[in-house]
Amino acid sequence: MLAAVATLAGCASMTGPRPIAVASMNPTQGNTATGTVSFVQRGGQVLVDVHMSGLTPGPHGIHIHEKGDCSAPDAASAGGHFNPDGAAHGAPGHGAHHAGDFGNLTADASGKAELEIAVPTPQFTLVADAPNSIVGKALVVHADPDDLKTQPSGNSGKRVACGIIALK
């Protein structure tokens, strides 16, 4: 029995802790959207849990952007969509799309929105030094819905909230 416990304890330490990251979302100039987005890497996927408030009711594009910089009043400093493979913009789960494409987040009448998605780790990872790592990148919520086709960014309009993805 003791040998079995020691074996299980050894297996737990071999897998190591699960990478966890958080983006604290702050409003861009003239907007009120705030929230928290958590990322947990488990097995072959990253679980993404979005909680936002202060949005206008309806759908809003949400994407990971290439730079970890939300310093510009309009978050233009975050750059374009995170796209390490050079794919076309599109709908997540439906063929080719940027690694940073999450589709749309829909706010209710009170401006609150929640979204849970699972993203396969070949698309991106929380391993900081990997070429497809999202650690240190910006996450952006847009004013308008992502149409899931217009190149290169889905015609999602202005950026209303921005946060940097940081390991916990």
Image (cartoon, rainbow, N blue to C red):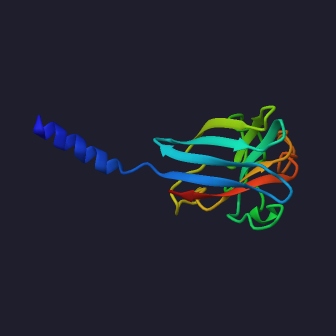
Front residue of this view, candidates 117 and 91: 117
Name which residue lies at 71% across and 60% down: 66
State whether residue 164 is above or below residue 87: below
Name which residue lies at 83% across and 53% down: 31
On the image, the x and y values in percent for residue 165 come to 61, 57
| Residue 122 is at least partly visible in this image | no
Name which residue lies at 81% across and 48% down: 142
On the image, the x and y values in percent for residue 7 come to 19, 42
On the image, the x and y values in percent for residue 161 come to 76, 53
Quadrant for residue 132, please give it: bottom right
On the image, the x and y values in percent for residue 33 come to 77, 49
Front residue of this view, candidates 139 and 119: 139
Name which residue lies at 46% across and 41% down: 43
Tally of numbered discs = 0
Q: Is residue 29 left or right of residue 121?
A: right
Quadrant for residue 75, please give it: bottom right
